[in-house]
Image (cartoon, rainbow, N blue to C red):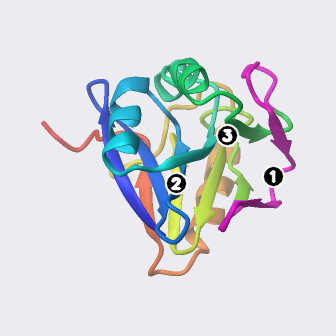
Amino acid sequence: MNTIIVPCLFDNFSYIVRDEQSQTAVVVDPSEGWPVMKVLEEHRLTLAAVLCTHHHADHLGGLDDLRDEYQGVAVYGSDQEQRISSLTHRFSPGETLAINNIRVRTTSTPGHTLTSVVYQIDDMMFTGDTLFGAGCGRLFEGSAAQMFDSLKTINREDSQTKVYTGHEYTLT
């Protein structure tokens, strides 16, 4: 497995996790459709699923474009998430998902939103707005205590885990 970083909007990242054996991929947080579709096409990848970390538009703005282009693509999100109407697969955080050869561990990380989740695939963690390069996401719904607990949960991971955040806020 490897990850292709797709810059979107002004400071967002979408991610494509590619299974080289099957040439299938999952997309994490498609902020925009066309940049993600361009990379999928360039690498000749088959889109197997979209993983949503939370409901904010700057993370899901390209979801409808992907669903239009890749008819029947699976869209995953927390079973607690009611604001993403296009979810086709809901999971209980803590579950491990099997998407073709890609195994995805899910973790509930309330704070930024009450339904935020983090995805881990092999040694790669996708944090959405739970964690940034220089801090954590603003508390739109959750409490400081919830965010602190979520950050402690993330911190328990192996120190070799590669962390992929939802935004680039370290540039000036």
* Mark 1 and mark 3: Cα distance apart in space: 10 Å
Give the residue at mark 3.
116
Picture quadrant where residue 14 is located: top left
Is 103 included in the stretch rendered in magenta? yes
Determine crowd level at label 1: few under 14, some 14-19, many 20+ residues with C-alpha closer than 10 A: many
- Look at label 1 and name its amino acid: Pro
- Look at label 2 and name its amino acid: Phe
Is 164 included in the stretch rendered in magenta? no
- Numbered range of the magenta stretch: 81-105
- Look at label 3 and name its amino acid: Ser
Determine crowd level at label 3: few under 14, some 14-19, many 20+ residues with C-alpha closer than 10 A: many
Give the residue at mark 2.
126
Q: Is residue 22 above or below residue 142?
A: below
Task: Judge left or right: residue 20 versus residue 94.
Answer: left
Give the residue at mark 1.
93
Q: Which numbered disc flags the more N-terminal residue, 1 or 3? A: 1
Q: Which numbered disc flags the more N-terminal residue, 2 or 3? A: 3
In this view of the protein, can residue 50 be seen by the observer? yes
